[in-house]
Image: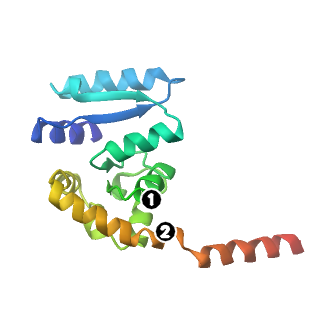
Amino acid sequence: AFDTVMHKLLEHDSNIFIVVIFEKEKPIWKQILLHRFRSVSEHHHRLIFVPTQSSVDFFRITHASAFLLDPFPFGGGVTTLEALGACKAVVTLPTNQSVPRLTAGMVQKMGMDHVLTADSIEDYLNKSKKLLDINYRTEVEKEICLRRKHLYDQMDAVREWENLFKIISRG
């Protein structure tokens, strides 16, 4: 289903590219995705495969990106946290995730779920297409910048960890 999403986004706007980061140690995944994508889309030449990057280079890619897609069935975690920290939008579809819905939780914690969390593939596509508009995307990024503190300034989470460690240390 994610292949179809990528195809429809590329079909919608002939000026966009989708960057896919893959592990150099597992090149077979790149080949499988490319083979699968070629079978559903004539836009396969607009997928750009980039091997896993250093933190600095990953941040450069993130900053250069219009927005990020939280892929499914395996979604983002640290990648999403870093993207939101850089004020970048991340569109997610938690009902299609097979792993913990980390991105949806982060977006909800920021109060941005109405903008970034989709409830269907069609909604995922619509939210993504809307972010292709630079004026709208700029407003969303400003809002993410204002609200990202809800992810990072979490003393209640620190207190929960402290309490857990106290309980564990008492044995």
Q: Is residue 69 visible?
A: yes
> Relative to the observer, which residue lies in front, 95 or 38?
38
Q: Which residue is mark 2?
A: 151
Q: Is residue 92 visible?
A: no
> Quarter of the image containing the N terminus?
top left
> Quarter of the image containing the C terminus?
bottom right
Establish if 102 lies above or below 3: below
Q: Are marks 1 and 2 in contact (CB under 8 Å)?
A: yes
> Relative to the observer, which residue lies in front, 104 or 50?
50
Q: In the image, what residue occupies the spot 52% across and 41% down?
A: 55
The amino acid sitting under disc 1 is Gly
Q: Which residue is mark 1?
A: 85
Q: In the image, what residue occupies the spot 61% across and 77% down?
A: 155
Q: Position of residue 88 (x, y in %)?
A: 34, 55
Q: In the image, what residue occupies the spot 32% across and 48% down?
A: 69
> Relative to the observer, which residue lies in front, 17 or 113?
17
**In the rendered view, does 45 fall on the left or right side of 79?**
left
**In the rendered view, does 136 fall on the left or right side of 97?**
left
The amino acid sitting under disc 2 is Leu
Query: How many other residues sit within 10 Å of disc 1, few (<14), some (14-19) or many (≥20)?
Result: some
Q: Position of residue 20 (x, y in %)?
A: 36, 34
